[in-house]
Structures are given as structure tokens and as C-alpha cells.
């Protein structure tokens, strides 16, 4: 199994340096070699589980938090907002 | 005997009788932390003043004649991936080194409502990924039975604190063995409840479909007491199961007569140390003598458990940990100009290698073209393994297995070999995959004197049966061995 | 569009639902409030928090499913769509991937008086993202999380539209249904309804071309412009012998242009997988069935019926159905059988609508009843009162519960249609306006208007103008 670790790292928003790439590639290949020993399995692989239905929440609104509490952990705050580097969209 | 050495059940009775105060108990535990934690390094964050205040509140309520729940005044250590309002919650990661949640996890709300005392937050593997607590960004926790060895993981801080007496009981979380494996290695009792028995709200997610909060105690009764205090349905957690809950602790009574105990041979095969096999088989013999019936049986898919586990857990982790991006909370890199640089550098600097490995693996198995081959197949395997468990529970009431293939290894011995580390979990992951409850309890020592643990696995929501069987065993052997003597430095304040 | 080409259009509409709380937490679902004031740890994606699904979101989506003749998947699930962006605090959007709540439906649209069926592929529920705020004076971008977790339904059409007019008719039909069901506010200016547009072109008789998707289309008129721009852009490329590459483009309505966002090669890999924090959605057959109740006749069906039954034009039918209360008033008045349908429509889309627009109030705030409207229209058509007097009557009956007859009486608005009485007045006017009479006779025919006006003045506006005109001509 060849893994494009650079691509996967990009998707994961992880920066790997040149030394780390071969290390992670090798480790991932070993792990995948273990993981690939899955047997052939029967079944359609549907991931629905109607035997355990979800209870839904009633549509009732409430305000429980103040803005300053919610932004207290933010690395950078300006005018009641979290700040990120300029985004051009 | 010092107060910190007693069981929670005993301490609760002593406080109720007015023999001791919550403050005296709290001081005893805080002193124990003071004297041992420089060596054990179980705590990441302490709140001594707050703990004493909580203890004083209990004493005040008690003096006013109020009837208090059993956990009132008991110091409960909390794994640092469980959110505590106003108290730093780090997941042992640089990424959350400064994160102070503005909310309590549901289990913490419950503990507060029952007047438990919270001395502080306990070390763990970073984001609960690991089996030795060595992946913590902050410190390595030592096994109180041998300070050169690992306590197991990921709830290593919780297991070590309870073993060392620096907490009376503790909460941990278990995704693939993270409660049972360190409990086994530290010689304490660890309960991983049925998936959905305890609310996950406020537990920082590693693998949402496998994570479950559970309890540590030095006795079975203590583990049961803490479980009783935190279990039950929660409208804030859609995966918590709506059901009636009756406390287990008052029902505990030593009896295994007629109990059918299955012994799945796959759990006693390659890789399991002889001393461990022997200890577990001796325990089985004890239970048989007391009237239980032993049934050898087979769970053929066991060997695939680790594969399915690493695919599902990593896939969910890659998504769950994507929110740590330096925008809203936690660590943010200083090295960036663009948004992309901020994302990449924050995450690369904020996460350790084990976390990165799992994120990469999880991203890979979910990525376009690989989903069916990995994730979907693993989920199908999960269904198959669950069916296997359901069918063996038609033949027996519960299963008995080793908790871990081997006892505590040396700090640093395996940290550079991820696969070797992953194999620690071979006996524990199938339980998470099938969402079953299981308890690990001490069942002897190896020739180095290190604790060996055995695991009891039951059908969904059979916690009462599991704990009762564990309790019976504890009584049969006349109680578990006393707390380890910590080295000569003990007492040097 | 250039001759010989055909365009194929498919639309993805995102509509915000008007629930009280957000989709996965109990924060208020409210627009336009102070930044980051409608948030909690759950919608801000804080560690350890978990979603719980709002039942009304499911109900609204099922209602829409019924209205669009979809089959409802009573057993379905939610999935995570993973991507990094500052307005998405969890770095994944909870949506539905392979098993949406509703599938395989259609909606009838009306273009140039003809009905056409547009297929609806699916309707699914998902959460909205936050908003990024950019300031010129500020070096960074600000993030407001208020909109995070606002419930959305995404309605995906089949590529069944062949012109921008059809696309517009489809958008109007969907919007009318959302409003009819009262599940979305459909306020364009608040972005509560937005769409992505898929366009391809091909030569007539040839297979469909490669499609491009355009994002950021925020108004229906913008959608029309975007579709036309895109079709022309693609045709030009083809005419130059180039091929179309599948890409995602961004529509800039102010510049009337689209720009490449990403090509197929760097298509996002969203790594969808089932949301493990939520269980399977299981709806009972009874619940799904009960959501059909109260849907009533859909706006597009009603429009077709009004055109058929009352022979209304598509334009009039549209104007009535757009505001269901207007159509209700119309039908109730028409049912009385006294006044002509087109006269009733004139009153409703004309003077009554002007009142509604000027005051910004709904019809229900006014006193007018179907009987009053019917009487009013009849009084004017039969010549009992002039159309000017009709407006005076309307001024009263909009606010007071009085019969039209009583108002006419009270205000003395009845037209004098008695030829004998009018003749006297005509003769008097002719006598007193020698000059005008001379002018008329000398060929200045517009002097007649002045003379009619003089008659009107003497009858205090009550003379039947048609009759008076006839009498004037007779005596001139």
C-alpha cells in the first residue's frame, strides 16, 4: 500500500517536515498492513440502526451563555468577534 | 491507617457517623498528593483551596442535619478530558494547555450535585490516545507499584492516583481499554460501562462511537459507588440510553452460585504472558469453587478487533480533532501570515506525534476512494463482532479474560513502537467495538510483583451482574492487596 | 442565447427554517442581533459538546417533502461533511449524505402559461455556517458565530430546466411553497434562501455537456443573470473550439461575472461519514402521515386552478397566489357569483394591493369582506356608481363594517342615470358655455371633455359620464 502522506497531511491541515514524512509514511504503512487483515464480511454495510431510534429535542430556545464567557478562550478577539487572518472568499 | 487509605464506602459511613469531617478527609488526600505526586505525577492541575471549600460545604450541610448522598465529601479525581467549568481542561495536550471550559460535563454536574470534592485533574495520554500515559504533553505518570514503569493508559493518571491514595476514587474514559488497562496495571478496579450508560456530554471526544466515561476504585464497591453517581440518561447526549436506573451499590452481595462464566480461548492465546494466563485461570478456579460454572467457548472474530478499532477510532478522531484549529480556543501558533499557515502550524505545533498519527490514519481511511475498503468494512466487522458477543451471551452470563496481555512495562520501553503499544489493547478493544460493559479487577501478581488484572465482560447493561461477580471475587480472596508502599522519599515534604 | 444550443440547469436551494431554536442546540434561531450573542458551547464547537436534533426541523423538512411529492425516508441518518473554514467551528458540517430525509419528488412550474414538471432529487437537513466579516480598516477577518447551527433544508433539483425563465419559475414556486407551509421566512436580504446553480450547454440533439457549478447566488434575479452569463460563457468557449471543464465558479452579482473557484482536480474531499454523536432518525408512519395534514392546496396548483376555473392570466393568478390572503379574498368574492372575476382581480391587485403595500399590513388587518368586495365590483360594473366613487367606497369598507349600499347612500355616490334629469343639466351647460360649443362645432373635439367636466361639476360628480357624453353629442 502506497500512501501519499503529503496529501493526507494537507487534508488534515498538518505540516510535516521532510524528516517526518518518511517516518510517518513508514508507521502508517505498518499500521495499515495490520489493519488490512480484515476478513471478507457479509452484509450490505448499511449504517442505519433503526433498533436504536434517536429521541428528538423539543424546539425550545433559551439563552444560557454570555458572549464574554464564550470568547474568553479565544486567542484573538476584536469587536465581539474572533479574529482570523484575512480570508478572501 | 491514614484516611486516604480507606475505601470511599467506609469513609462515607465514617462521615455520616460524624467520626471524621469532610475537611479532615480532604486534607489527608491533599497531603498525600503533596507527598507522593512529585514521584507519581498523576495530577496536571490541582485546586486545593476549592477542594477544601467544597469539603467545608459538606460539613456545614451535614451539621445542619441534611441527609447527604454517599459521595458527599469524597475526593474524586477527574481525568483531564472531562470538562470542568472554570477549571483548566487540557486533554494533556499543548493544544488545550490554557483551555478553561465555561461549562461542566454532565458527569461533573452530577458529582457537584452530590457534593463530591474535586481535588484536581489527572494526567492521561494526549487526547486519550495511547496506552501508557507517555504521550501526555506535560509529564509522564509513574506506576505506584514501580515508579520506573508506566501506569498504563490512557487514563493512567486516574489509575495511578487511586492506586497511590492521592484520590479515593476517580473518573476516567475508555475508548479501547483506557480505563481497564491502567486499572489492571496499577492493581485497582476499573469499570467501563455499556456505551450509552453514562453521558458523554463534556467528555472531549476521541472516538464518539466508542468513548465511555467510567470509574476507578480500590474496591469493587467504590467503583460501583462512583458509577451509580454518574450514570443515567442525559438529554444533552443523544447516544445516552433512555432507561430506568437503579443504584447497584446497595444490591452488592457475594454470590456466584449458578453463574455461567464463559472463557473465550482467543483471549488466552499468543502474546499473553504465562503469569497472566495462570492468574486469570486461578481466579476462574476460585469462582468455580464458589459455585460458578465455567464454559470454554470461542469468539472467532476477536483477532480482527484491533484492525476494526484502529480504523473506526482514527476515522472519528480525525474529524473530532479537526476543531482544534487555533481559531476559537486553545493553542495558536505564532508563526503565520495566512489562514492556511495558521491552521497547519497551530495543529503541527499543538498536537504530539501519536495524535498526528491517528489523525493521518483517520483522514486516510475516510478519504475519497478508501472509505468502502476501510471504514465501511470496519463498521461491518463491528456489527459481526457484536453479533458474536450476543450469541455467546446465550450460552453464558458473562465472560472472563485477561485485561492486558502483559503487566506494566518500563517507561520509554515501547513509546517508539506504535504497533507494539497498540497490542496492549487486544483484550479490551472488542468490548468497545460491541459497546459492552466490562470491569477489570486485580487477580494476582507476576514474579516481579506487578499487578495482574482480569476482565469480566457482560451483555449490554449488565453492570450490576458484572460488579456483583467482581465483588464476590474480592470477598472470596479476602479483599485486594493493600496500597503499594511508595519509595523512601515518601513523607519528605 | 445562441441559436442551435440548449442549456440544462439544475438548482440547489438552501432555505433557512423558521424554528425557534437552532438545529443542534437550544440557542435562538434569530437574525440580525449583536454579533456572537446567539451562541453557546455547542454551536461554537467547543470540546466535549454534543448535538441534539430539533424535532421541528425534521417536521418542516418532511412537510416540504410532502409538498414536493417526495418519498419520505422514515429511517435515515446524518453525516459529517469535513472541511476547514473559520466559519465552521467544528470543522465539519452535520448534514445528510447517502440517506436524505426526502427523495424522488417533483414540482409543477408555470412558464408562458404552460405547466412543466421539474424533478426534485432530494431534500435533506443540515446546519448553516457562521459569517465572516471583512473591514477595510482591519487587517484580519472577524468571525460571527450567530448563524452557526441555524437549520437549513437543501432542496436539490434534477437537471430539468432548459432556460433561465424556467429556473426563475422553479425558484418562485419553491419559495411560494416554503411560505405556504410557513417553514421559512424566505427573506432574500437576510440570506435565508440561497442557491447554487448548475449549468451546462449542448448543441440541440446532442448529449448533455459538462456542467459547472456556481456558488454564492443570493437572489433569484441574480440566479437568472448567473445562468445566462454561464450559458453564454460556455457557448463562447465551445464556439472557439475549446472544451468545458467541470469546475466550481463563484458568481459576483455586482460585476455580473463568475470567477473560477476550483477545478475538478482540486475538488474538496469532504470525507463524509455517519455522524457518530447522533443515532438513526426513525419516524413513525403516523407521524409522517400527520404532517400531510394542513398542507392544503399548494400555491402552484392553486395558480393553475385559478387560471383554469376563472380564466385568469398567469400574471394575475401569480399576483393573487403570491399572497394567499388575496387569493382567498378573490375566491370567496367570486363564489358569491355577483361580480365578474376579472373585475374582482382588478380591485385586488390594484387599489387594495396599493393599500397593503403602503401600510405594510396584511389583509386580515382590514375590515373588507368578500361580500363587500363583490358588491363594490358589481356596483361599478353596472354603472350604479362611477369608478372614482368606487374608490371612495373602498376607502370606507376597508376600515368599516358597512354594506356597500349603505356607503353609497350615506355619501350620496349613486350615479344619476336618469336621462330626463341629465338632459336638463346638459342643456344648461350648453347654454352657459357658448365658446366651447363654438369650438367643438369648429372642429376642436377636445372641447367635449371640458363640457363633460362641467356637467360632472353640476351633478356633483354623480352624473353617469357615458350618458352625459351621449346627450351632449346629441344636442351639439
Image (tube, coloured by chain):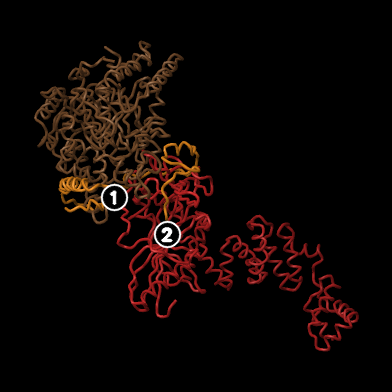
**Residue closest to the eye, C8 or B81:** B81
- What SS does tag 2 mark? strand
Question: In front of the other: label 1 or label 2?
Answer: 2
In terms of image quadrants, where is residue B156?
Answer: top left
Q: Is residue B314 above or below residue B90?
A: below
Mark 1 Cα-neighbour bin, 10 Å: few <14, some 14–19, many ≥20: some
Q: Indicate left or right for C428 with B475 as reference.
A: right
Q: Position of residue C423 (x, y in %)?
A: 86, 80
- The chain under label 2 reads C
Q: Residue at x 44, y 76 (%)?
A: C1
Q: Position of residue C110 (x, y in %)?
A: 49, 70
Q: Indicate left or right for B346 with B149 as reference.
A: right
Chain A, colour shown: orange
Quadrant holding the C terminus of chain C: bottom right
In terms of image quadrants, where is residue B87?
Answer: top left
Chain C, colour shown: red
Q: Position of residue B334 (x, y in %)?
A: 36, 42
**Chain with brown colouring:** B
Q: Residue at x 19, y 17 (%)?
A: B478
Q: Is residue B404 above or below residue B485?
A: below
The label on residue C155 is 2
> How far apart are labels 1 and 2 at the CA level?
23 Å
Q: Which residue is mark 1?
A: A47
Amino acid at each position: 500500500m502506497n500512501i501519499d502522506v503529503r496529501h493526507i497531511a494537507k487534508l488534515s491541515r498538518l505540516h510535516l517536515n521532510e524528516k517526518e514524512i518518511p517516518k510517518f509514511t513508514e508507521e502508517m504503512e505498518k499500521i495499515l498492513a495490520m489493519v488490512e487483515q480484515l476478513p471478507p464480511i457479509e452484509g450490505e454495510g448499511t449504517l442505519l440502526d433503526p433498533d436504536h431510534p434517536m429521541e428528538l429535542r423539543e424546539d425550545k430556545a433559551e439563552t444560557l451563555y454570555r458572549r464574554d464567557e464564550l470568547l474568553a478562550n479565544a486567542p484573538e478577539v476584536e469587536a465581539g468577534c474572533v479574529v482570523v487572518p484575512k480570508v478572501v472568499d | 491507617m491514614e484516611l486516604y487509605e480507606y475505601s470511599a464506602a467506609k469513609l462515607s459511613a465514617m462521615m455520616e457517623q460524624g467520626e471524621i469531617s469532610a475537611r479532615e478527609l480532604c486534607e489527608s488526600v491533599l497531603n498525600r498528593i503533596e507527598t507522593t505526586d512529585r514521584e507519581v505525577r498523576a495530577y496536571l492541575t490541582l485546586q486545593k483551596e476549592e477542594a477544601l471549600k467544597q469539603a467545608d460545604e459538606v460539613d456545614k450541610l451535614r451539621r445542619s442535619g441534611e441527609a447527604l448522598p454517599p459521595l458527599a465529601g469524597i475526593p474524586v479525581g477527574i481525568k483531564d478530558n472531562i470538562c470542568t467549568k472554570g477549571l483548566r481542561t487540557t486533554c494533556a495536550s499543548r493544544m488545550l494547555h490554557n483551555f478553561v471550559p465555561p461549562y461542566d460535563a454532565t458527569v461533573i454536574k452530577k458529582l457537584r450535585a452530590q457534593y463530591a470534592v474535586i481535588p484536581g485533574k489527572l494526567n492521561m495520554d494526549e487526547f486519550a490516545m495511547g496506552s501508557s500515559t507517555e504521550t501526555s504533553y506535560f509529564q509522564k505518570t509513574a506506576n505506584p507499584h514501580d515508579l520506573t514503569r508506566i501506569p498504563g493508559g490512557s487514563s493512567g493518571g486516574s489509575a495511578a492516583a487511586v492506586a497511590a491514595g492521592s484520590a479515593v476514587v476517580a473518573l476516567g474514559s475508555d475508548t479501547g481499554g483506557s480505563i481497564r488497562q491502567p486499572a489492571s496495571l496499577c492493581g485497582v478496579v476499573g469499570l467501563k460501562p455499556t456505551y450509552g450508560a453514562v453521558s458523554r456530554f463534556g467528555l472531549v471526544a476521541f472516538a464518539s462511537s466508542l468513548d465511555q466515561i467510567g470509574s476507578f476504585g480500590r474496591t469493587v464497591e467504590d467503583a460501583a459507588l462512583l458509577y451509580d453517581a454518574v450514570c443515567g440518561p442525559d438529554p444533552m447526549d443523544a447516544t445516552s440510553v433512555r432507561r430506568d436506573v437503579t443504584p447497584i451499590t446497595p444490591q452488592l452481595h457475594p454470590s456466584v452460585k449458578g453463574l455461567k462464566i464463559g472463557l473465550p480461548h482467543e483471549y488466552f492465546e499468543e502474546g499473553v504472558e504465562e503469569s497472566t494466563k495462570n492468574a486469570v485461570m486461578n481466579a476462574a478456579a476460585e469462582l468455580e469453587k464458589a459455585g460458578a460454572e465455567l464454559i470454554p467457548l470461542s469468539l472467532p472474530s476477536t483477532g480482527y478487533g484491533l484492525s476494526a478499532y484502529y480504523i473506526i477510532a482514527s476515522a472519528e478522531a480525525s474529524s473530532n480533532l479537526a476543531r482544534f484549529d487555533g481559531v476559537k480556543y486553545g493553542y495558536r501558533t505564532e508563526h503565520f501570515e495566512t489562514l492556511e499557515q495558521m491552521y497547519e502550524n497551530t495543529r503541527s505545533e499543538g498536537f504530539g506525534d501519536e495524535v498526528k498519527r491517528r489523525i493521518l490514519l483517520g483522514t486516510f481511511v475516510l478519504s475519497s476512494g478508501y472509505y468502502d475498503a476501510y471504514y465501511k468494512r470496519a463498521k461491518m466487522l463491528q456489527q459481526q463482532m457484536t453479533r458474536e458477543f450476543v450469541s455467546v451471551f446465550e450460552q453464558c452470563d458473562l465472560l472472563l479474560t485477561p485485561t492486558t496481555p502483559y503487566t506494566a512495562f518500563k517507561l520509554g520501553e515501547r513509546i517508539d513502537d506504535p504497533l507494539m503499544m497498540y497490542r496492549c489493547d487486544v483484550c479490551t478493544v472488542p468490548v468497545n467495538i460491541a459497546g459492552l460493559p466490562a470491569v477489570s479487577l486485580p487477580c494476582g501478581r507476576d514474579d516481579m510483583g506487578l499487578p495482574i488484572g482480569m476482565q469480566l465482560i457482560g451483555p449490554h447493561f449488565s453492570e450490576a451482574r458484572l460488579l456483583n461477580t467482581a465483588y464476590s471475587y474480592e470477598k472470596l480472596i479476602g479483599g485486594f492487596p493493600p496500597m503499594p508502599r511508595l519509595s523512601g522519599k515518601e513523607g519528605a515534604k | 442565447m445562441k441559436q442551435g444550443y440548449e442549456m440544462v440547469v439544475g438548482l440547489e436551494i438552501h432555505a433557512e427554517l423558521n424554528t425557534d431554536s437552532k438545529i443542534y442546540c437550544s440557542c435562538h434561531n434569530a437574525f440580525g442581533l449583536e454579533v456572537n450573542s446567539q451562541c453557546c458551547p455547542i454551536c461554537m464547537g467547543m470540546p466535549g459538546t454534543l448535538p441534539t436534533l430539533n424535532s421541528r426541523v425534521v417536521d418542516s423538512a418532511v412537510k416540504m417533502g410532502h409538498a414536493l411529492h417526495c418519498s419520505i425516508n422514515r429511517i435515515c441518518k446524518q453525516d459529517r461533511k469535513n472541511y476547514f473554514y473559520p466559519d465552521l467551528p467544528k470543522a465539519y458540517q452535520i448534514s445528510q449524505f447517502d440517506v436524505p430525509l426526502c427523495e424522488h419528488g417533483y414540482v409543477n412550474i408555470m412558464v408562458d402559461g404552460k405547466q412543466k414538471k421539474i424533478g426534485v432529487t432530494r431534500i435533506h437537513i443540515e446546519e448553516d455556517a457562521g459569517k465572516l466579516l471583512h473591514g477595510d480598516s482591519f487587517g484580519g477577518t472577524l468571525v460571527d458565530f450567530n448563524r452557526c447551527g441555524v437549520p437549513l433544508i437543501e432542496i436539490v433539483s434534477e437537471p430539468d430546466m432548459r432556460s433561465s425563465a424556467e429556473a426563475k419559475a422553479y425558484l418562485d414556486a419553491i419559495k411560494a411553497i416554503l411560505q405556504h407551509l410557513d417553514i421559512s421566512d424566505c427573506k432574500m436580504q437576510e440570506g435565508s434562501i440561497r442557491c447554487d446553480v448548475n449549468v451546462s450547454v449542448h448543441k440541440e440533439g446532442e448529449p448533455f455537456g459538462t456542467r459547472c457549478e456556481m456558488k454564492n447566488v443570493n437572489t433569484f434575479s441574480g440566479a437568472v443573470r448567473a445562468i445566462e452569463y454561464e450559458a453564454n460563457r460556455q457557448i463562447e468557449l465551445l464556439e472557439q473550439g475549446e472544451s468545458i471543464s467541470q469546475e466550481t465558479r463563484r458568481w459576483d452579482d455586482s460585476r455580473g461575472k463568475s470567477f473560477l473557484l476550483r477545478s475538478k482536480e482540486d475538488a474538496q474531499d469532504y470525507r463524509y461519514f455517519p455522524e457518530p454523536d447522533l443515532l438513526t432518525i426513525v419516524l413513525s408512519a403516523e407521524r409522517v402521515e400527520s404532517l400531510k395534514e394542513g398542507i392544503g392546496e399548494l400555491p402552484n396548483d392553486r395558480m393553475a386552478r385559478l387560471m383554469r376555473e376563472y380564466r385568469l392570466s398567469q400574471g394575475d393568478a401569480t399576483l393573487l397566489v403570491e399572497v394567499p390572503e388575496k387569493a382567498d379574498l378573490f375566491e370567496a368574492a367570486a363564489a358569491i357569483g355577483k361580480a365578474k372575476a376579472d373585475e374582482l382581480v382588478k380591485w385586488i391587485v390594484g387599489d387594495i394591493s396599493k393599500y397593503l403595500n403602503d401600510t405594510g399590513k396584511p389583509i386580515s388587518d382590514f375590515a373588507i369582506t368578500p361580500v363587500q368586495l363583490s358588491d363594490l365590483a358589481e356596483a361599478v360594473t353596472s354603472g350604479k356608481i362611477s369608478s372614482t366613487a368606487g374608490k371612495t367606497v373602498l376607502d370606507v369598507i376597508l376600515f368599516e363594517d358597512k354594506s356597500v349600499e349603505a356607503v353609497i347612500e350615506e355619501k350620496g355616490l349613486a350615479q344619476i342615470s336618469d336621462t330626463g334629469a341629465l338632459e336638463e343639466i346638459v342643456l344648461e351647460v350648453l347654454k352657459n358655455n357658448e365658446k366651447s360649443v363654438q369650438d367643438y362645432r369648429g372642429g376642436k373635439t377636445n372641447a367635449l371633455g371640458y363640457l363633460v367636466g362641467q356637467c360632472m361639476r353640476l351633478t356633483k360628480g354623480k352624473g353617469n359620464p357615458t350618458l352625459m357624453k351621449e346627450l351632449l353629442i346629441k344636442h351639439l
